[in-house]
Image: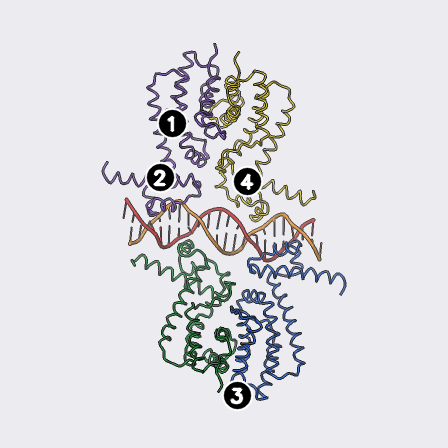
Chain colours: A green, B blue, C yellow, D purple, E orange, F red
DNA sequence: AATGAATGAGGTTTCATTCAT
DNA sequence: GATGAATGAAACCTCATTCAT
């Protein structure tokens, strides 16, 4: 990659950064291309050398986050913890990323009326399913609830913690809900 | 209410109906006042005899739904069921209304980037809290989880069922998740 | 037609007038909607209440001229002159209208890359053909030249007079060329 | 001309070729410099090493055609045919070139709203005039029609054949019109 | 109460041209 | 000589809202 290419990537990044900041502050519709380029300190026309439209930027930013999540999952995949522990860890990892980018996701979700498209590819869901199945096989988790109901509940739990309006800190919030969730999921002897 | 009043309400309703239909079909921003009034078969100017702005319509429509929820709650309030039963019933009532108006809520939520303003006044939350508290007092529900965590989890459950992409029918979907939720909430002896 | 309608037509006409004037002065591409509406003394937005685009205006203006030509033809139709005289008269009528609107036609022709679409419907060509045929039947015109060649030559003659860069006045110009044309067309005994 | 010069001319030609192709396909305004250079497979900036502007290209292309016409005229000049024959030959030569480049001329004419600048220098008109005058002196052509009227009629004849919408083939079309024209021009004894 | 023509701020987008590399 | 990223003026067009009728 030559100097020119590197320069171009830098410019792109700086446009994305400003755009996301503004999207979060005032919404996508309310942000104008002129404002973005003002913030990035480039001419308006430059925007169109990099993106087709404002909405393009969201896709670009999301793609980056998805990569981040994937990397975290790969690490967790190695772990030798038992299923409830794995779920706890998974929750904390995801929760963290979601929290950090909460507003970005909100912007994205509000933008696309399409069904909420959580920024995790099939790999994530697969991983979650395999952990739950493992727990069921070990007799630790109830088998009377369809797995997809469990995974959806899990995702809803994260959503709920993120959009919480409670005073309770995020971490604690997650833990309480995880407690409820795992308690409901666990097979009683 | 005299004839004039009734007439006015009819006009208002027909405007709202067309507007909501269009909002759902193509989004609020993308719907123009002209289109709404075209659909309602009135002149553009007439719109402003009834509403201050396009956004006003959403408030108006939501207000109606809230009233609906309140009426349902009042009925439930009379019931002499035990707490878990009450929660089940509450869930089904809410779930139904949410489902029926899912798109309306989505439109509303997308509109206001302001903290998601669930379309239930304090009364609903109060009612839910009082049921949970009653359950705790009777020793049926765990007391180790803060009540607001429980209510948030409950709302997340509904959200999760509504936005579900599973094949499982809505009603059943709700019941599975309620099972998980109640199981987690219930005090084990 | 009520007052509102009449007013609307007036506004439309005033927009068209200004637009055509500018189109002739500086070309269609070079004329901006803003300029037109500035000249017509209305807001920019008003333009779009009347026309979809600048190009729309040309169609509108041409439609008017076509009507004018048709009316003239109808009068000529009544005439009982012999064929060469009719052709002379026809030429003068058309030449006059073409000349008066020469620039409008030029603008139109430059605008549409489509084959030059002279502003006369089938009726005109039909009339011309019938005159020529009449002349042929009376033995006054040569029959060895296909009629469409003759009509095209006739139209070219008008074009040539209009776009002439000679000092000779338009009327005379037409007459000279008509002389050449009729001389060529006439059957020699 | 050294290798460098030849190389430069090649590049220039390839740019012109692509440009003209696009001009004809979609008009001058609608063709962008970027597209031209994309087609010519060079960088955008390169364009400005060869031409000052998009419009420059038209001039360049026209200049080539004019040279072509001139070369043809010079050949014809040597000929010892009589005036009507010379006019016939001239017509066929010109008609051919016009036909081949009909679209190029159309593009050019549409571009410059300035008085139509037929792509023939003074030399051509001079030649035509001299042939007609020769005919008049020999008593073959009428002297009652001003020469410029005759030349304009002649040019209009070519135009008319080129823009013809008749089914008659171009060559034949030209001949019919030439017949009419010469018949009109010829002095009757 | 109903109307719809007029408005213009405000956005998006294009693209010829420059110039540093 | 070749390049292409940066530029920003300039155009188009939309549409919520007003207000005279």
The span from disc 1 to disc 4 (Cα, nearest Å) is 35 Å
The quarter holding residue A37 reads bottom left
Badge 4 density bin: few <14, some 14–19, many ≥20, Cα 10 Å: many
Question: Disc number at residue C19?
Answer: 4
Name the N-terminal-most of marks 1 and 2.
2
| Nearer mark to the viewer, of 1 and 2 | 2
Residues tagged 1 and 4 counted as in contact (Cβ below 8 A): no
Residues at discs 2 and 4 in contact (Cβ within 8 Å)? no
Say which residue label 1 marks: D121
Residue that numbered label 2 is attached to: D16
Asked whether disc 4 touches disc 3, contact meaning CB atoms under 8 Å apart, the reply is no
Estimate the spatial distance between the alpha carbons at disc 1 and disc 3, rounded to whole Å: 105 Å
Circle 3 Cα neighbour tier, 10 Å, few/some/many (<14 / 14–19 / ≥20): few
Q: Position of residue D167 (x, y in %)?
A: 49, 29
Whether labels 1 and 4 belong to a single chain: the reply is no
**On screen, residue A151 above or below D45:** below
Q: Nearer the viewer, residue A153 or C183?
A: A153
* Residue B162, above or below C31: below
Q: Judge from the rendering whether residue C149 lies leftward or rightward of residue A3; answer left or right.
A: right
Which label was assigned to residue B188? 3
> Is the residue marked by circle 2 packed among few (<14), some (14-19), or many (20+) residues within 10 Å?
many
Q: Quadrant of the N terminus of chain A?
A: bottom left
């Amino acid at each position: 990659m030559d100097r020119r290419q590197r320069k171009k990537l830098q410019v792109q990044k700086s446009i994305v950064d400003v755009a996301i900041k503004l999207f979060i502050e005032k919404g996508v519709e309310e942000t104008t291309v002129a404002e973005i380029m003002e913030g990035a300190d480039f001419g308006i026309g430059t925007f169109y050398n990099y993106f087709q439209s404002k909405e393009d930027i969201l896709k670009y930013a999301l793609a980056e986050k998805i990569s981040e999540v994937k990397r975290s999952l790969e690490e967790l995949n190695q772990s030798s913890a038992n299923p409830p522990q794995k779920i706890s860890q998974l929750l904390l990892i995801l929760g963290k990323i979601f929290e950090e980018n909460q507003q970005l996701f909100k912007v994205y979700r509000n933008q696309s009326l399409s069904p909420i498209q959580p920024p995790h590819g099939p790999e994530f869901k697969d991983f979650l399913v395999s952990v739950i199945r493992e727990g069921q096989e070990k007799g630790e988790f109830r088998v009377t609830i369809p797995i997809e109901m469990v995974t959806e509940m899990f995702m809803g739990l994260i959503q709920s913690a993120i959009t919480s309006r409670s005073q309770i800190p995020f971490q604690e919030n997650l833990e309480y809900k995880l407690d409820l969730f795992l308690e409901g999921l666990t097979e009683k002897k």
